[in-house]
C-alpha cells in the first residue's frame, strides 16, 4: 500500500533569498549586468531612466575632446555626425522588429508624436473626421493629439485600448495607442489592434516608450504604420536622449511632415527656398541633431551586443513572476494590490502595486536603498530592466517593502491604541483592493499565488 503521508506534512517555508541566488547563478544574461555602472542600491526605476552603460563615458569624452575639440567641423563628415540619425536608427530597428531604413533617431518623443499624428491624418481618407486616442495614455500623447486635431479640423475620441477594435469606424483617421500602460504596466494587443484599425481603413500609431528594449514589438511583422519611442528607459540612452520615429516603408514616400526642416530636405546644403523632402526615412528628420546625446545613445546601445529581445523578454517575465511571489511572501496581507496583470500576454516589464500612502512608502524605500517611483495617487512602480536587474534585486526590494509596511502598520496600530480608537486591520482601506481585508488580490488573480500558482 502506498504511503501518502507526504501529502499531509506541512511544507517548509520557501527561502526566497536562496531561490534568488540560484536563479541568478543560472541566468544567461547575468554577465550583461557588468556592462553597467551600478552600486549597492537596488535600482528598479529603469522604466523612467535606464542605468549608465560603462561604454558611454569614454565615448562621450572622445566626442567632446577629439571630435569636437580637435576635428571640429570636419566631424560632420569625417566623424559620421551627419548620418548618425539614420545609422543609430538602424541599430534600434532590430530591437523593435524593424528592417534597416525604417527608423530615424531625432527630436523628442513629443515632437515625434506630433509629426506622426499630423502626417497620419494627412495620409488618411477625405471622409475621416476623428482621431482615436488611448484613454489611459501618457498625458503628453493626449495633449498633442488634441492639438493636432485642432490644427487639422478633426475631433479626438478617447477609447480604452481593449475597445478600439469595436469603436473604430470608417470616419477614423488613426489611433494613437501606448503599447504598455505607463501606470499599470499592462501590455496592449499591438497585432490585434493594428489589424482592426487596418480593416476599417485607419492607421495605427504606436507609442513604444515602455516596451522598446523590454519585449518584442514586431513593427514590420504586424504592419504598424507609424511608431515613436524614447531611448532613455530600457534602451539606457541617458537623460533626455533623443527619441526615434518609425515609418512603414510603403508609407515613407507619402509621409508629409508638419515640421519640414532643412535636415529632411532632398538637398539640405542647397539652401533652396522651396521645400522638397528627401527620400526614405530621412523625411522624419527636422533640424540639426543633438550630437552629444545622440552619440551617447550610440555608445549605450553597445550594451545590447549579443543580446536578443526574446532573451530579455524571457528574463523580464521570470523577474516579475519572482517579484510578485516575493511580495506575497514578505508583505502583510491586504497592504498592497497588484494592478499589473498576472497574464504574461498582458504584462510589460514593470510591476505596479496599489498601496495607501504610496508616496511616503516609496520615499522610505529609497532611503533604505530600493529605488522605484510612484504615480498619483497610490501606485508604486518597479521597473525591471533585464539587462541589469537581478533576481537578488527584486527579492531584496520585496523584503524591504515588507519591512516598511509592517513597521508602518505597527506604528498606526500603536497610534490608534494610544488614542483610544479601535482601528481597523492593516490593509483594510482602499489599497487592500477587491480582495478585501486579509487578501492581496491583484488585477488577474491573488498575489499570494502569483502567476506561477
Image: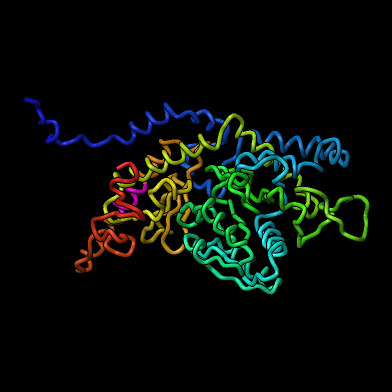
Confirm whether residue 169 shows in the render. yes
Instruction: Report the residue at 81% width, 38% height from top.
Output: 80
The image quarter in which residue 12 lies: top left
Instruction: Report the residue at 36% width, 45% height from top.
Output: 324
Confirm whether residue 366 shows in the render. no
Q: Where does the image place residue 252, in percent across and percent down from the top left?
A: 74, 51
Q: Where does the image place residue 399, in percent across and percent down from the top left?
A: 34, 43
Left or right, 249 with reference to 158: right
**What segment carries the magenta color?**
401-408
Q: Is residue 148 above or below residue 38?
A: below
Magenta stretch holds residue 23 = no
User: Which of 157/194 is in front?
Assistant: 194
Q: Where does the image place residue 66, in percent across and percent down from the top left?
A: 81, 35
User: Which of 159/202 is in front?
Assistant: 202
**Total count of labels:** 0
Q: Main secondary structure of the magenta part?
A: helix
The image quarter in which residue 149 lies: bottom right
Instruction: Report the residue at 19% width, 69% height from top.
Output: 420
Q: Quadrant of the C terminus?
A: top left
Instruction: Report the residue at 26% width, 61% height from top.
Output: 436
Left or right, 246 with reference to 352: right
Most distant residue in the top direction: 1
Q: Where does the image place residue 451, in percent across and percent down from the top left?
A: 34, 44
Q: Is residue 439 above or below residue 157?
A: above
Q: Quadrant of the N terminus?
A: top left
How was the colour assigned to the protein in this rendering? rainbow
User: Which of 167/53 is in front?
Assistant: 167
Amino acid at each position: 500500500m502506498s504511503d501518502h503521508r507526504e501529502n499531509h506534512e506541512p511544507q517548509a517555508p520557501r527561502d526566497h533569498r536562496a531561490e534568488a541566488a540560484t536563479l541568478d547563478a543560472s541566468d544567461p544574461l547575468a554577465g550583461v549586468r557588468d556592462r553597467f555602472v551600478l552600486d549597492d542600491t537596488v535600482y528598479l526605476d529603469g522604466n523612467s531612466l535606464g542605468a549608465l552603460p560603462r561604454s558611454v563615458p569614454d565615448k562621450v569624452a572622445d566626442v567632446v575632446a577629439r571630435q569636437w575639440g580637435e576635428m571640429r567641423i570636419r566631424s560632420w563628415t569625417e566623424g559620421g555626425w551627419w548620418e548618425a540619425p539614420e545609422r543609430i536608427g538602424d541599430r534600434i530597428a532590430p530591437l523593435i522588429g524593424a528592417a534597416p531604413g525604417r527608423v530615424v533617431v531625432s527630436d523628442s518623443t513629443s515632437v515625434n508624436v506630433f509629426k506622426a499624428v499630423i502626417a497620419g491624418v494627412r495620409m488618411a481618407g477625405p471622409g475621416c473626421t476623428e482621431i482615436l486616442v488611448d484613454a489611459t495614455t501618457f498625458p503628453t500623447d493626449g495633449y498633442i493629439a488634441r492639438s493636432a486635431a485642432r490644427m487639422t479640423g478633426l475631433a479626438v475620441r478617447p477609447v480604452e485600448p481593449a475597445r478600439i477594435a469595436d469603436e473604430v469606424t470608417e470616419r477614423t483617421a488613426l489611433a494613437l495607442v501606448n503599447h504598455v500602460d505607463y501606470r499599470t504596466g499592462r501590455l496592449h494587443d499591438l497585432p490585434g489592434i493594428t489589424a482592426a484599425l487596418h480593416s476599417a481603413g485607419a492607421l495605427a500609431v504606436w507609442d513604444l516608450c515602455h516596451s522598446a528594449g523590454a519585449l518584442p514589438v514586431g513593427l514590420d511583422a504586424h504592419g504598424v504604420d507609424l511608431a515613436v519611442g524614447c531611448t532613455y528607459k530600457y534602451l539606457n540612452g541617458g537623460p533626455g536622449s533623443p527619441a526615434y520615429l518609425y515609418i512603414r516603408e510603403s508609407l515613407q514616400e507619402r509621409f508629409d511632415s508638419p515640421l519640414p526642416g532643412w535636415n529632411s530636405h532632398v538637398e539640405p546644403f542647397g539652401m533652396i527656398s522651396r521645400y522638397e523632402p528627401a527620400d526614405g526615412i530621412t523625411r522624419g528628420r527636422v533640424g540639426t541633431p543633438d550630437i552629444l546625446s545622440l552619440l551617447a545613445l550610440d555608445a549605450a546601445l553597445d550594451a545590447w551586443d549579443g543580446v536578443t529581445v526574446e532573451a530579455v523578454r524571457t528574463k523580464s517575465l521570470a523577474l516579475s513572476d519572482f517579484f510578485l511571489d516575493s511580495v506575497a511572501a514578505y508583505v502583510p496581507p491586504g497592504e498592497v494590490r497588484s494592478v499589473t496583470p498576472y497574464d504574461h500576454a498582458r504584462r510589460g516589464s514593470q510591476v505596479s502595486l496599489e498601496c495607501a500612502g504610496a508616496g511616503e512608502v516609496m520615499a522610505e524605500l529609497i532611503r533604505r536603498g530600493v529605488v522605484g517611483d510612484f504615480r498619483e495617487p497610490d501606485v508604486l512602480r518597479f521597473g525591471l530592466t533585464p539587462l541589469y536587474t537581478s533576481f537578488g534585486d527584486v527579492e531584496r526590494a520585496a523584503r524591504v517593502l515588507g519591512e516598511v509596511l509592517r513597521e508602518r502598520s505597527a506604528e498606526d496600530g500603536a497610534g490608534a491604541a494610544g488614542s483610544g480608537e479601535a482601528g481597523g486591520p492593516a490593509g483594510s482601506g482602499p489599497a487592500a483592493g477587491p480582495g478585501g481585508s486579509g487578501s492581496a488580490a491583484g488585477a488577474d488573480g491573488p498575489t499570494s499565488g502569483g502567476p506561477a500558482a
